[in-house]
Amino acid sequence: MRSGEQSGRDVLARSVKGQARRVGLGAALGCVHQLGEALVPVLIGVVIDQAVAGRDAGRLALWLAVLAVMYVALSWSFRLGARAGERGAEEAAHTLRLAIVRRVLDARGGAEEGRLPGELANVATEDAKRVGAVNMALMSGIWAIAGITVSAVWLLLTSVPLGLIVLLGTPVLLWLGHLLSKPLERRSEAEQDRAAHASGVAADLVAGLRVLKGLGAQQAAVERYRRTSRASLAATLRAARAESWQTGLVLALTGGFIALIALVGGRLALDGSLTLGQLVSAVGLALFLLGPLETFAWVNAELAQGRASAARVAEVLAAASAVVGGDAPVPDPVRGELRLRGVRLGGPDGVDLDVPAGRLTGIAVTDPASAEALLRCLGRETDPESGSVELDGVPLTRLDPAGLRAAVLVAAHDAVLFDGSLAANVTPEAESRHGTAHGAAEGADLRTERAMAAAHADEVARSLPRGAATGVGEGGRSLSGGQRQRVLLARALRAGPPVLVVHDPTTAVDAVTEARIAEGLREIRRGRTTVVVTNSPALLAVADRVILLDGGRVGAEGTHAELVRADATYRTAVLA
C-alpha cells in the first residue's frame, strides 16, 4: 500500500511538474507585468518631481510617453502570462483526469472498491480541476513575490524604514495567511467528500429509476437524496464560511499593513526626508501592494483546496489492486483449456473441474453465489482464497490481466449498454473505423452480421425505427429486457475471443427465441472454447458437456440428457 501511495503522489507531482516550462514562461511574463505595475507609481513620482514641480512641459510629455509605453507592455505581458498559466492549469487537470481514468479502467481493478461511480466522476472532474489550478496559483504567487520585491527594493533606496517595513512585514503576513488557511483546507476536503457522495447517490438513483418506480419507492429515494444533499450543502456552507473568514482576516491584516506604510511615509515627508514625488510614489506603492498581498490570500485558499483535492486524487490513484502480480504473456496461440483445482471463493468450496479446449461446456448451479464467484475467478476480477485457475496449463495469477481479458472474455448477465446506437454497442470500434482498409472493413461487417444473427439481435434491429443506427438510450433503457440481452450477447460474440464465458444470456427472452439463440451460439462458437453458466435447459441441451455445481462443489457431469435422466438434483435445478 505504501508503494501505491508513493505512486499516487508521483502522478500528482508529474501533473504539476509537466507544466513547469509553461508555468515558468507565465511566471516570467507575470514578473515583467508586476515590475511594470510597481514602476508606475515610481514614474508618477518622478513626473511630479522633474516635470510638474519644475513646470517643464517637454519633460512632462516625455514621461507621459514613457507611461503610455509602460501600459502597453503591462497589457501584453499580463495577457500572455495569464494565458500560459491558465493553459498550464487546464493541461495539468487533463493529465490527472487521464491518470484517474486509466487507474479506474486498469485490468487489475480495485479503484472502484467502496466508491460509487458518481464519486469517481467527481474526483476525475472537480478534484482534478482544483489540483490543476495549483499551477495558476503558484504562478500568481511568483508574480506577487516579484511585485513585493520590486516595491521593497525601491522603498529601501528611497527610505530605509519604509523598505524594512515591507521586507519584514510581508513574511509575517504570509505566515499568518498560511495559518488562517488550515481550517479552510479541512473543510474543503469535507466539502468535496460530501459533494462526491451526493453525486454518487444521484447517479445511483437515476440508474435504478425504473426499478424504483416499479417498487413504488420514489419517495424513499427522494428522502435519501435529500438527506445526502443537505449534508453536502452543510459541508459547502462550512467551507464557504471558512473561506470568507480567511479572506476577510487576511484583507484586514493587509489593510493594516498598508496603513502602516502610508503613516510612516507621511511622517517622513513632513520632516523633509521625502520629496513630494517620493511621497506620492510611496503611497502609490502601498496601494499597489494591496494587489500582491490579496493575491497571496487567494493563493493560500487555492493551495488549501488543492491540497484537499490532491489527497482525494492520490487515494484513488494509490488504491490497492483487486488482483496482484501477473505480467507473463498469454500463451500464443490460445488453445482455450481451462482447469480449476481446489478453488475456494465464496460459493465454490474446493472446486476441481476441467473445461476442454474447443468445446461448448455448460455449468448449472444450485446456488447463484457459486456462479458469481466462478465468473469473478475466470475473469480474474478477484483471485481465489485458495486453489488455482489455469489457462492452457498456466495459472491466471502469472498472466498479465489485460492480455488475459483479451483471451478470456467473461460476459456477465448484468453488463450495461452504452448511450449510442445499437450498432455502436455491438461493435464499439465501428465509429472510429473511417480509415480502415476496405477488405478489413468488409470482414468486420461480416463478423458483426454473424454475431447479430446468432444472438437474434438482427430482429431487434429490424424492429427499431432506424435499424441498427437507432439510439438505445443510457443503459439501453429504450429496449426491453430481452432485447438488451440479445444485444449484449451479440457484442460478446462479435468480440470473438479464444475463450468466451457467458452468464444467463437468455433469461428474459421467450422459449422459441431462446432455442434459436442456443443453436446460433453453438454454431458461431464451433471449435472455440465456450462456457455457458446457466440453468436454461435450451442452452444446456446444446452443450457438449454439462457440469453441475452443487453446494460449491462439482456434483455431477455428463450431457444434459444424461443428467436429466440420472440426477435428481440436476433436474430440480434445471427443470423446476
Image (tube, rainbow, N blue to C red):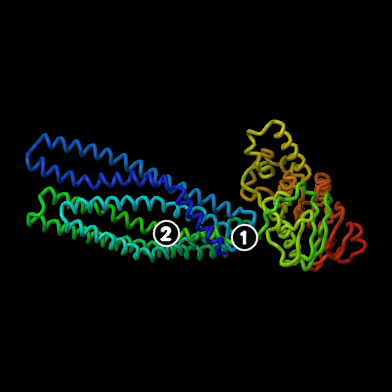
Determine the CA span between mark 2 and mark 1.
Answer: 28 Å
Q: Is residue 571 visible?
A: no
**Amino acid at the residue labelled 2:** Gln
Image point 50% across, 51% down: which residue?
96
Image point 31% across, 39% down: which residue?
76
- Decide: few, some or many residues near mark 1? Use Cα within 10 Å; few <14, some 14-19, many ≥20: many
- Residue under numbered circle 1: 321
Q: Which of the 4 image quadrants contains residue 239?
A: bottom left
Q: Which of the 4 image quadrants contains residue 111?
A: bottom right
- Residue under numbered circle 2: 305
In the picture, the quarter occupied by the N terminus is bottom right
Q: On residue 530, which mark appears?
A: none
Q: Which of the 4 image quadrants contains residue 224?
A: bottom right
- Decide: few, some or many residues near mark 2? Use Cα within 10 Å; few <14, some 14-19, many ≥20: many
Image point 40% across, 60% down: which residue?
304
- Name the side, left or right, on which 167 lies relative to 535: left
State whether residue 272 is above or below residue 220.
above
